[in-house]
């Protein structure tokens, strides 16, 4: 076993294993989820407050503090984020077992479908087709939906993609999530503002990815980037939330180890 990590260290240093950044830049322009007032209150945008910048407020140092929502930018959804997961004793960011923050990852590429249909929904049959092509989704894996939607994250308009009928962005059906949970995945992730499709408020149950994933004490990842740099199978995902006490989620620096 010590040989395993020695070989891994060699692979990291030689570049045989690459570290890929799956996170979006986190700043005042990071798109924020918009919920109509009749559904709920919204997260304010990230705000940076300067404490000092090598000046009278701190002559030799620079530092800032933030107003920052838990669910801002590339982020982790903890089980207690949703009412269906509220009673999991280890369901807050500070109580999740850390072993769950490092896991293998399956990437389902539906970028073509999502570019042709902004309301594209991944079905359970489509997951089974992926498995026929790439092999079974193993227990303990992350499953990520690649849509290339992250290429739209430079502006809220293109990322949220809302019109009079509401937001239009791809996501999973309830049945796809049920199927993945039956395989005991560690969590579900997407490139969109949240883990659910833009149309998810009208689904049964509403926001099925949130409802079902967190009910099962599993985790969500939202606003992931660069999934087009990952293989369908064979990479390792590192996604650790900050240890917020009683936190429902956290911005993360999501990293993939890619052979
Ligand atoms: C609250 C209500 C609906 C949604 C979300 C949060 C998220 O996407 C989130 O960031 O968890 S869709
Ligand atoms: Mn979230």
Image (cartoon, helix red, strand yellow):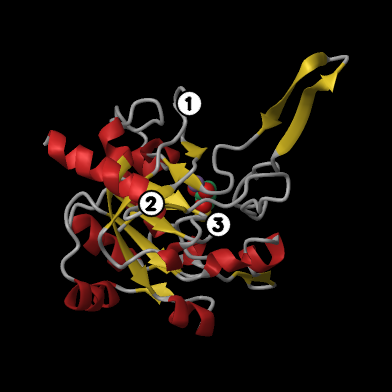
What residue appears at the point 41 percent right and 31 percent down from the top-left corner?
93
Disc 3 designates what residue? 193
Evaluate whether residue 216 shows in this view.
no
The CB of the residue at mark 3 lies under 8 Å from ligand 1: yes
- Residue 26 quadrant: top right
Taking the image as shown, residue 138 lies to the left or right of residue 47, namely left
Residue 256: numbered disc: 2
Evaluate whether residue 26 shows in this view.
yes
**Front position in the image: 16 or 98:** 16
Residue 118: percent from left, percent from top: 54, 77
Quarter of the image that includes the N terminus: top left
Q: CA separation, marks 3 and 1?
A: 21 Å
Check disc 3: other Cα within 10 Å, few if <14, some if 14-19, many if 20+: many
Going from N to C along the chain, the mark reached first, 2 or 1, is 1
Residue 9: percent from left, percent from top: 28, 41
What residue appears at the point 38 percent right and 58 percent down from the top-left corner?
208
Label 1's element?
A: loop
Nearer to us of marks 2 and 3 is: 2
Taking the image as shown, residue 78 lies to the left or right of residue 191, namely left
Label 2's element?
A: strand
Check disc 1: other Cα within 10 Å, few if <14, some if 14-19, many if 20+: some
Residue 244: numbered disc: 1
Identify the residue at the far right of this view. Answer: 56
Taking the image as shown, residue 88 lies to the left or right of residue 248, namely left
Identify the residue at the far bottom of this view. Answer: 116
Residue 240: percent from left, percent from top: 40, 37
Label 3's element?
A: loop
Check disc 2: other Cα within 10 Å, few if <14, some if 14-19, many if 20+: many
What residue appears at the point 61 percent right and 37 percent down from the top-left corner?
69
């Amino acid at each position: 076993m010590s040989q395993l990590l020695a070989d891994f260290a060699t692979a990291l240093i030689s570049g045989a294993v690459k570290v890929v950044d799956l996170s979006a830049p986190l700043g005042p322009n990071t798109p924020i989820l918009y919920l109509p007032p009749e559904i709920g209150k919204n997260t304010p945008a990230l705000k940076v407050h300067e404490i000092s910048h090598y000046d009278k407020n701190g002559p030799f140092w620079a530092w800032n503090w933030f107003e920052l929502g838990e669910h801002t930018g590339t982020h982790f959804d903890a089980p207690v984020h949703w009412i269906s997961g509220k009673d999991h004793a280890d369901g807050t960011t500070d109580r999740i077992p850390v072993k769950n923050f490092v896991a293998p990852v399956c990437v389902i590429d539906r970028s073509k479908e999502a570019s042709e249909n902004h309301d594209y929904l991944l079905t359970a049959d489509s997951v089974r087709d992926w498995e026929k092509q790439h092999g079974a989704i193993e227990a303990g894996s992350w499953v990520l939906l690649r849509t290339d939607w992250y290429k739209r994250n430079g502006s809220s308009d293109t990322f949220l993609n809302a019109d009079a009928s509401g937001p239009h962005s791809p996501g999973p059906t309830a049945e796809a999530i049920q199927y993945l949970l039956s395989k005991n995945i560690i969590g579900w992730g997407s490139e969109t503002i949240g883990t659910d499709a833009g149309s998810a408020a009208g689904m049964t149950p509403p926001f099925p990815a949130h409802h079902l994933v967190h009910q099962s004490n599993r985790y969500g990842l939202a606003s992931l980037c660069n999934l087009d740099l990952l293989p369908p199978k064979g990479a390792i995902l590192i996604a650790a939330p900050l240890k917020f006490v009683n936190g429902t989620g956290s911005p993360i620096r999501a990293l993939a180890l890619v052979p």
